Image: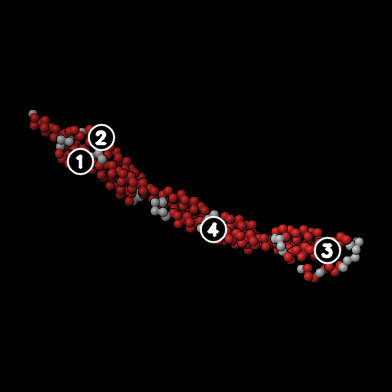
Amino acid sequence: QLKQKQAAREKKINDKKGELWEMKSSFESFIIQGENFLEENFLEEANSSLLTSKNIAQKYISYYEKNYNLLSKDIQFLDLYPKPDFFESSLSSLESLLLTKERNIEFDKIIKIGDSLFGIGSYVSATEMYERARPFDDNFQVDSKIETSKQAKSNVLTNSAEAALLINDFDAALDYLKQAINYSNNSYLIENKIKEVIENKLDHNLASIEKTGDSLYQLSNYEKAILTFEKYLLLKPNSPRIEDKLKKSYEIKNILFARREKVFDYRKTNEKDFF
């Protein structure tokens, strides 16, 4: 009878050991399966293998703890069967691999869209996509793409400014350059270009003002000619040539104003050295 009890006890232990060993083997199988799925980029399947592995691990641990008192009397059990903490490292490793793969796939997806936008010249949108990839950029690949995309946009704006300058559209050129400075990696050059355009705009305006003043003088509209030359001097004081023209305009105006009372030498109104 004692032998029967002992045999029954050993059978019970062996049955439980068999169940635990089956769970352990199944757990390891799903872990390997999950890793294989990840290599093929089958993320849903890998995640399913991970969840199955977790469930098996929980069952193993529960069963292990429930039957530990009985099974611990078996020396082979203590030597060959893993303790509950055995599963943690394998699960953590697979979870980490899955997370890394998900991040890499999302990163590649965003970068691909950014590259496509860059390829069609949509540099601002490309930059925005590259910025979205930053949280997934573990190898610091994005910074150079962002820099290249921004500089490309700056170059487009700078070229547009140059085109505007060809038709003397200084305001448009300045607008393009002020936008370009926000994207350029060399703001110093653009700042200098802005200063140059402002100077050219002033020179162009002054030339136009002077031309208008000259035309008014030739039309004997000395009052408006005076106002025009004074406007010039407000923009650019200490201009001897314009000061001389203003002076002569005043002289002719005064002559005409007082001609009813005095006799003048009207040759002054037609001086060849005025222009």
State left or right for residue 56 relative to residue 12. right
58 with respect to 9 (left or right) = right
Q: Quadrant of residue 165?
A: bottom right
Where is residue 149 drawn, in percent x and y? Answer: 49, 56
Q: Residue beneath label 2, please?
A: 62
Camera-nearest label, 4 or 2:
4
Q: Nearer the viewer, mark 2 or mark 3?
A: 3
N-terminal of the pair, mark 2 or mark 1, is: 2
Labels 2 and 1 touching (C-beta < 8 A): no
Residue 125, percent across and down? 51, 52
- The crowd level at tag 3 (other Cα within 10 Å; few <14, some 14-19, many 20+) is some
Q: Which residue is mark 1?
A: 81
Q: Secondary structure at mark 2?
A: helix
Q: Which mark is residue 252?
A: 3
The local crowd at label 1, few if under 14, some if 14 to 19, many if 20 or more residues have their Cα within 10 Å, is: some
Sequence order check, earlier mark of 4 and 1: 1
